[in-house]
């Protein structure tokens, strides 16, 4: 086979191509809108009568200034309570080291990103703060990148050998886990990764259980709570259209009351038909025994038996089965929003048929990257190059073999470049090279719609229907015109929304 084109690392012209920028399809998105609501499943808001909310990272979005405080306090607990070496204190918090959705091999002490098919993404495995060479990863996992299902994280992200970090609060935990591993490795000190995992997890837990995080936020609400006026606007809009609202959160009432008063005003409870605090999710959704308790105006527990869930009252604990029995709110007329795919959304979708909305703040940064010309060029050439390789592989003459090897190398370089645009260590939370991440798989499975923040709802009429894009399956030909990408459509209330933001 005689070829007239060679390696294209300069991104210049191939003899049969125009400049690379012309390879980008005419209808491709050049500017995604991070205020869009994205649909995994068709949802008609006109059929939704009841809206439910988690509190942390749903009604209340927090600034990244919280992460170093959690990290520093947990590091102190690790040193002073668990008697870890004082030298660990020299490790400062590393912003943007970890991303949500990563897996941690508890026995091997490895932090990694896994795709939807349980395969580790090469180049994203870290022991401490150092990347593990791909060859060593293969040795550690028996000559494969595959993590067997029985080892992988279970239904709630907690498997016997591998844990998935799905909580936004877990970012400082992953960083401290990596730092502690790094200290022992670089100082050639023998340690047990199992003990380290348990101790770091407990140290992070102590930050929450002892109320440090609540105290920091309540002392400086303006610093830590973001976009409170947008939450206020969402609640006003829903109530003005006759929707019923409820709140189910694991946080204590004093903390929620302080934050909601800051964002919405002292009469914030007037918006909600039911308020439940310290619910102990995800057990709230599966336990059918734990009863509701009512709190009085001072936040003290009352002894009365709960026969109804009344507006204006505050309830603690309880379970979803009693909630359904007392409210009668069932099925697809209920839409519940939360940030944790397992603790907030999984049971509600799979067991009870509620509609679910995932809050994914990382969408803002991810859509910014995807909207850049550099990303579009990299991805377009990566896809074109993959197509060329697919066709060239059947030719066995020396020149074809050499060109294929050059393209394979260039393809790997492009993959690394594209990954690094999101995060230099782990890349996008949604993609592992070509495949969706394990996080993406769960996002699509457990949420009907997803968005960067609740305020995205302000862009849509409450009779709006969200339609997922129909994309061809692998065995289908792309014979239809795909609808416009939802991310670049002009949403109905975008101008009004900008006045709030």
Image (cartoon, rainbow, N blue to C red):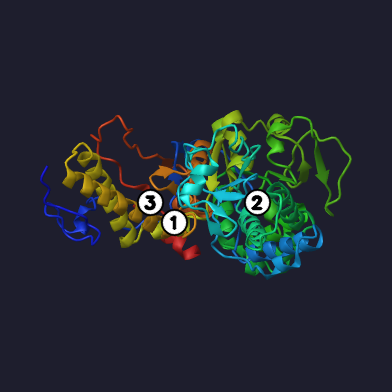
270 or 193, which lies in front? 193
8 or 310, which lies in front? 8
How far across and down, in percent of the image, does residue 344 sit? Answer: 62, 42
Occupied quadrant, residue 94? bottom right
- Mark found first going from the N terminus, 3 or 1: 1
| Residue drawn at x 62%, y 46% as measured from the top left | 108
Q: Is residue 327 left or right of residue 422?
A: right
Q: Which residue has dot 1 on it?
A: 366
Looking at the rendered image, the disc whose residue lies closer to the viewer, 3 or 1, is: 1
Mark pair 3, 1: CA separation: 12 Å
- Mark found first going from the N terminus, 1 or 2: 2
Q: Which residue has dot 3 on it?
A: 487
Look at the numbered disc 1 and give the secondary structure of its residue. Answer: helix
Mark 1 is surrounded, within 10 Å at the Cα level, by few (under 14), some (14 to 19) or many (20 or more) other residues, namely some
Mark pair 1, 2: CA separation: 23 Å
Q: Is residue 162 left or right of residue 323?
A: left
Mark pair 2, 3: CA separation: 26 Å
- Mark found first going from the N terminus, 2 or 3: 2
| Residue drawn at x 21%, y 39% as measured from the top left | 391
Mark 2 is surrounded, within 10 Å at the Cα level, by few (under 14), some (14 to 19) or many (20 or more) other residues, namely many
How far across and down, in percent of the image, does residue 47 sit? Answer: 50, 35
Q: Which residue has dot 2 on it?
A: 55
How far across and down, in percent of the image, does residue 332 sit? Answer: 54, 32
| Residue drawn at x 25%, y 59% as measured from the top left | 9
Look at the numbered disc 2 and give the secondary structure of its residue. Answer: loop
Occupied quadrant, residue 174? bottom right
Look at the numbered disc 3 and give the secondary structure of its residue. Answer: helix
Q: Which mark is residue 490?
A: none
Query: Is residue 419 positioned above or below 331 on the image?
Result: below
């Amino acid at each position: 086979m005689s070829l007239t084109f060679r390696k294209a690392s300069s991104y210049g012209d191939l003899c049969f191509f125009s400049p690379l920028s012309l390879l980008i399809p005419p209808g491709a998105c050049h500017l995604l809108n991070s205020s869009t609501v994205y649909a995994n499943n068709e949802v008609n808001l006109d059929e939704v009568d009841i809206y439910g909310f988690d509190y942390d990272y749903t009604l209340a979005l927090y600034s990244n200034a919280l992460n170093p405080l959690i990290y520093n306090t947990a590091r102190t607990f690790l040193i002073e309570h668990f008697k870890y070496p004082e030298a660990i204190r020299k490790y400062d918090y590393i912003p943007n080291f970890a991303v949500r959705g990563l897996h941690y091999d508890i026995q091997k002490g490895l932090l990694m990103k896994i795709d939807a098919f349980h395969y580790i993404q090469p180049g994203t495995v870290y022991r401490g703060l150092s990347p593990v060479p791909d060859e060593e990863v293969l040795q550690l996992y028996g000559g494969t990148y595959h993590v067997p299902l029985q080892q992988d994280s279970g239904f709630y992200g907690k498997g016997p050998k591998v844990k998935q970090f799905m909580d936004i609060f877990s970012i400082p935990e992953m960083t401290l886990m990596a730092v502690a591993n790094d200290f022992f490795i670089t100082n050639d000190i023998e340690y047990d990764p199992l003990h380290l995992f348990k101790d770091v997890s407990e140290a992070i837990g102590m930050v929450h259980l002892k109320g440090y995080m609540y105290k920091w936020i309540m002392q400086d609400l303006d610093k830590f709570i973001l976009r409170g006026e947008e939450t206020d606007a969402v609640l006003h809009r829903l109530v003005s259209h006759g929707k019923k609202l409820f709140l189910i959160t694991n946080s204590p009432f004093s903390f929620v009351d302080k934050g909601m008063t800051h964002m919405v005003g002292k009469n914030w409870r007037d918006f909600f038909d039911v308020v439940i605090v310290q619910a102990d999710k995800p057990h709230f959704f599966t336990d059918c025994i734990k009863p509701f308790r009512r709190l009085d105006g001072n936040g003290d527990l009352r002894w009365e038996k709960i026969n109804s869930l009344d507006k204006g009252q505050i309830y603690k604990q309880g379970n979803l089965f009693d909630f359904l029995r007392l409210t009668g709110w069932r099925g697809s007329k209920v839409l519940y929003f939360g940030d944790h795919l397992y603790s907030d959304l999984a049971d509600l979708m799979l067991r009870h048929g509620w509609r679910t909305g995932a809050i994914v703040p990382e969408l803002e940064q991810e859509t910014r990257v995807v909207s850049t010309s550099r990303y579009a060029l990299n991805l377009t050439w990566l896809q074109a190059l993959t197509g060329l390789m697919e066709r060239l592989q059947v030719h066995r003459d020396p020149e074809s073999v050499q060109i294929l090897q050059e393209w394979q190398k260039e393809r790997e370089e492009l993959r690394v470049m594209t990954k690094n645009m999101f995060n230099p260590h782990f890349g996008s939370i949604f993609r592992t090279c070509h495949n969706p991440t394990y996080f993406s798989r769960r996002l699509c499975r457990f949420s009907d719609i997803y968005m960067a923040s609740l305020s995205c709802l302000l862009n849509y009429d409450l009779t709006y229907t969200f339609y997922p894009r129909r994309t061809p399956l692998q065995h289908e030909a792309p014979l239809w015109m795909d609808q416009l990408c939802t991310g670049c459509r002009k949403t109905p209330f975008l101008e009004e929304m900008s006045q709030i933001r």
